[in-house]
């Protein structure tokens, strides 16, 4: 049963991160929302795949050690955002010239990580062995 909670949390995190990314990017760029429904699933899948190398070890660590602190997930979200920045662009140039893109990536990944925490640890915490 806990595995279903983890999967639901991961899917919810991918959806929340993608929604955040698309809404902020659309509002900042004078884009219309006409294609929102068509591209949302692809953005969510991309986010879920990209997040896996960081998210899965953090999820495993939190489940084995029963660490339910939101700070762990916030830190993982920030690290994931920094890795995204490093992988897709020149980080020095991006950090010095385009703070919108930097804050968009960091904010999106942090929202996704905290959504995972909210679903799996806050709304549906694991049952203890004594129960």
Image: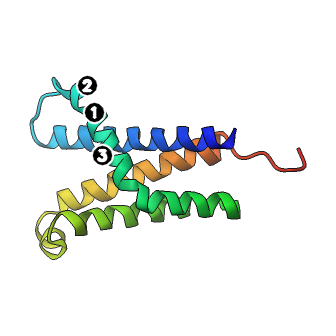
Give the alpha-carbon distance from disc 3 to disc 1, as whole Å.
10 Å
Within 10 Å of the Cα at label 1, are there few (<14), some (14-19), or many (20+) other Cα atoms? some
Q: Is residue 3 visible?
A: yes
Give the alpha-carbon distance from disc 1 to disc 2, as whole Å.
5 Å
Within 10 Å of the Cα at label 2, are there few (<14), some (14-19), or many (20+) other Cα atoms? few
Q: Are marks 1 and 2 in contact (CB under 8 Å)?
A: yes
User: Where does label 2 land, which residue?
Assistant: 37
Q: Which residue lies at the image location 31% right of the left edge and 67% below the top edge?
A: 82
Residue 130 position in % (x across, y down): 90, 49
Q: Is residue 45 left or right of residue 95?
A: right
Q: Quadrant of residue 19?
A: top left
Q: Earlier in the sequence, mark 3 or mark 1?
A: 1
Q: Which residue lies at the image location 33% right of the left edge and 40% below the top edge?
A: 44
Q: Which residue lies at the image location 61% right of the left edge and 38% below the top edge?
A: 4
Mark number displayed over residue 46: 3
Q: Is residue 98 left or right of residue 10?
A: left
Q: Earlier in the sequence, mark 3 or mark 2?
A: 2
Q: Is residue 102 left or right of residue 45?
A: left
Q: Quadrant of residue 27?
A: top left
Q: Is residue 69 visible?
A: no
Residue 37 position in % (x across, y down): 25, 25
Q: Are marks 3 and 2 in contact (CB under 8 Å)?
A: no
- In-front residue for pair 70/48: 48
Q: Secondary structure at mark 2?
A: helix
Mark number displayed over residue 6: none
Residue 51 position in % (x across, y down): 39, 55
User: Where does label 1 land, which residue?
Assistant: 40
């Amino acid at each position: 049963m806990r595995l279903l909670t983890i999967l639901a949390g991961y899917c919810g995190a991918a959806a929340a991160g993608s929604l955040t990314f698309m809404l902020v990017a659309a509002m900042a760029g004078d884009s219309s929302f006409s294609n929102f429904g068509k591209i949302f699933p692809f953005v969510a899948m991309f986010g879920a795949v990209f997040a896996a190398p960081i998210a899965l070890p953090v999820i495993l660590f939190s489940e084995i050690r029963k660490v339910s602190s939101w700070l762990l997930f916030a830190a993982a979200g920030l690290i994931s955002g920094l890795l995204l920045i490093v992988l897709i662009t020149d980080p020095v140039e991006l950090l010095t010239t385009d703070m919108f893109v930097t804050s968009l990536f960091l904010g999106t990944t942090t929202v996704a990580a905290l959504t995972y925490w909210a679903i799996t640890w806050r709304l549906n915490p694991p049952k203890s062995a004594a129960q």
